[in-house]
Image (cartoon, rainbow, N blue to C red):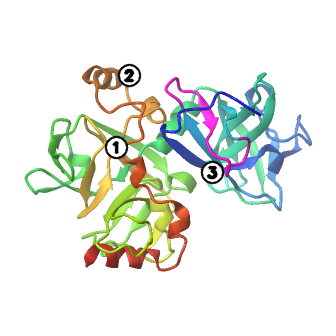
Amino acid sequence: MVSQAPDSALPFQHLPVYVAEALTVTDGANLGDPLSFAEELVPDDIYTLVADAEEKSLALRTDSEGQHFIASQYSVGHEGARVFLDCIATIMPPSGETIEVLVLVEVDDEGGVVQVYGAPLAPLTPKSDYALVGIDRGAATTRLAQLACVSFTGGTRITMATGEQKKVEDLEVGDRVLTRDDGPQQVRWIGHSVQRASGEFAPIVISAGTLNNTGDLRVSPDHRLFVYQRQDHIGVGRSELLIKARHLVNGATVYASEGGFVDYYQIMFDSHQIIFAEGISAETMQMDTRTSAAVPAEVTERIRQRGSNSLRTNAHAHLEVHKSLLDRPDAVELLKRASSK
């Protein structure tokens, strides 16, 4: 399968997904059918996740026109194939809590459906029943953008240009924040959303002292932390690293905080920046082809006019460390030692 290949410099993200056949209707109008796109979904159908369902990784890259493609040969699906964001399907287990599932459709060059994927935004349990209670065709793009937004949780202390420590929820547009590369910079936009702290929206907690941070740092799973290695203990071959919070989870000093709701805040400057949060370096939000749907239109236009925060580049991408290099039980301790000496 050959599709129009997206620019490799564009940002991409990994989504945990199930192939459609893993979620099948066990009671209702579509009895026996797998998860499908919105036109074929019937409210009140009961879906069950099969016992041996395997969660897979879907790597998506979004081009400058907002079109999505499978980004990697290591992803489920066919590299370069077009993917449509179809809808958000809301399902409900017997416990009564609702779970959103992002429905994505991979197509071939003629537009024919190759595969349907379901990306649950909270964990699903095999052999449990889930009633389809909602279908929203307009929310899929926004949900994907929210997943891609790097966010700090309420209470996170940000270092200002004056050295003051200010809680992220107390920041205002125009405030000057200390950045690692460009000194004091003005905040141009602050986003805020409340999410159920579950699955892909459960914040990652980096406990105080784990990476020489002064307090617990709570960030969204794909938030990247900046580490400067004085010694290359990880074996990356360079001193400057950007590491996704989710790749540091060890179940002890770094863990996902599930349960309840979480206040997420996004900070954006004229360009992608590294700032100081709880005393350590962390990135700020970049408005790119994935995240622009989460930013108000007037802010997007103002940034376009300023000619900053490009929608076509993946800032600092060359510093990101692949998960495979961090897949070791002592990775966090090695990073702490490497950045301390």
Using the image, determine if residue 46 lies above or below residue 110: below
Name the spot of residue 105 as percent of width and height, x first: 72, 34
Q: Is residue 214 left or right of residue 198?
A: left
Q: Which residues are magenta?
A: 63-78
Q: Residue furthest left?
A: 162
Quarter-of-image position of residue 208: bottom left
Q: Residue furthest right?
A: 32
Q: Determine if the magenta segment contains residue 64.
A: yes
Name the spot of residue 92 as percent of width and height, x first: 69, 47
Residue 297's disc number: 2
Label 2 close to label 1 by CB (< 8 Å): no
Q: Amino acid at mark 3?
A: Glu
Which numbered disc, 2 or 1, marks the residue that appears first in the sequence?
1
Image quarter hosting the N terminus: top right
Q: Is residue 160 left or right of residue 194?
A: left
Residue 97's disc number: 3
Is residue 256 visible to the viewer in this orientation of the structure?
Answer: no
Image quarter hosting the C terminus: bottom left
For mark 1, give the secondary structure.
strand
According to the picture, the residue beneath numbered tag 1 turns out to be 266
For mark 3, give the secondary structure.
loop
